[in-house]
Each structure stands twice: as C-alpha cells, then as structure tokens.
Amino acid sequence: MRAAIAAEWVKFRSYPLCLISCSVTVCLPFALSLLLARVQSDTKLTDQAAMYCCLRGMQLGQIGIVVVCAAISGQEFHGSSMRTAFLAVPRRTKLLCAKLCLSAMVSGVVCLVSGSLGYIALVTIYHISISQRILTHAIVLQMGACVSWILVGCIALCLSIVARSLLVSIAVLGVLIAGASQLLLMLTSIAKYLPDMATMRVFTDDPTFLSPAAGFTVQLVWAIVMGGGARSAYFKYDIR
C-alpha cells in the first residue's frame, strides 16, 4: 500500500493541474476570508466574526479541493493512462484505496494551511485580541472543517471515477458549493442533505442547518456510497 500511495504521489506531482489547483486552493480561502472581513467591517472586527469569516472562506474554498481530488483520478481518464495504472497495480481495490489515502492527506494538509493563514491574517490585520475560549473553539471548528474537506475530496475523487471524467466531478460539486445548493435549499429542505451542505454548521452558526454530528454522518454516507460506486466502476473498466 505504501508503494501504491508513493506512486500516486509521484503522479500527483507530475500533473500540472494537480499542482496548480493545490496552490490556488491554499490561497483561495485566505483571500475569501479577507474579502468577507472587509465587507463586514472596514475598521473593527470581533474575534468571533473573524473566526466565522475564516470558516466561511474555507467553505467556499472547497471548490479548489474538488478540483485537486478530481484531478488525482480524472487525469488517468483524460491522459489515457488507466491501462498503465491497472497494469502497475493489478489489485484495483488497492489502487482505489491508495488514491483515497492521497486525497485525504492532501485535503487535510491544504485545509489546515489555508485555514491557519486566513485566521492569522485576520487577527493581525484587525489587531484582534483572541481569548482562550475563542481560540479553542476556532481550533475545534478548524478540525471539523478539515474532516469536511477530506470527505468532500473523497466524494469528488470517486465521482470522477464513476463518471470517468474529472470535468463532471468539478462541474457538479463545484456548482453546488458555489451556490446552487443554497438556491435549492430555498426550494426544499432536502437540500440540507447534499454533500456540501451537510456540514454547513461547521462553517456557520446558522441553526437551520444540520448539527455537526448529523452533518458528518450524512457526508460520510455520501462518501461510502460514492466509494462503492467507484470500486464497481473500476472493476467494470476493461483494459484489453
């Protein structure tokens, strides 16, 4: 398994879309956090407001991790290298697990880095004094955001395998995160169970969304279902 993950890491580093989208994803939540803070206040920002500006930026920044994780698997369909991947790692379940592990590691690291940069920038720019209670709460929510990013990344990766295209995964999940889910929520409360909306309580204190525990459960179910679909798609893929 370690060799398979190492091989996926080499492919990740050699694919320009993965590197570019990963770099943009680090910067995107940071920029969005500053923009949201600017809209809220030009001069004064409370510690709690800064925390939720950062978290909201991270929620929208999930678009970037969708691109990153979709590219991890989608590159093989667009680059016609799936045959080589299956010949190198004949056990297809092992190959899928390696991709999911790499997706989880990249998503987690990028989330922690981008979230920390955004929060530190807001605290520094607005000269905010952070209480221990707020800091502890921010760290807990950051860990929750990290889990959400990992699950969204895994869903994006599996969707690209099921659809055999990274563009489908980016189009579907990217549009949902960008605002389509919230438009659907105006029409029906069922939209709360969409993969990107399930964990919104991690990024906002709005009580209309699912509780964090329920949200993570729903998102995990999405990931498991999509993982099963990806495994089935891998076994149906003919390399002859």
Image: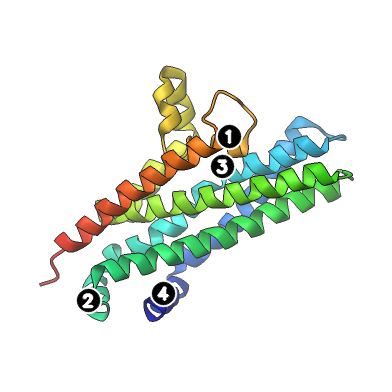
Identify the mark nearer the N-term, 1 or 4.
4
Label located before the other in sequence (3 or 1): 3
Viewer-closest of 153 and 205: 205
Mark 4 in CB contact with mark 3 (< 8 angstroms): no
Residue 225: image location, x then y, percent: 31, 47
Could you tell me residue 146's position as x and y percent? 57, 52
- Residue at 44 percent across and 71 percent down: it is 12
Residue 35 shows in this picture:
no
The label nearer to you, 4 versus 3, is: 4
Q: Are marks 3 and 2 in contact (CB under 8 Å)?
A: no
Label 1 SS: helix
- The dot on residue 90 is 2
In the rendered structure, find residue 201 and report the number of the disc placed on it.
Answer: 1
Badge 2 amino acid: Pro
Residue placed most toward the observer, 40 or 129? 129
Label 4, on which residue?
5
Query: Hey, what amino acid is under mark 1?
Result: Arg
Quadrant for residue 188, please give it.
top left
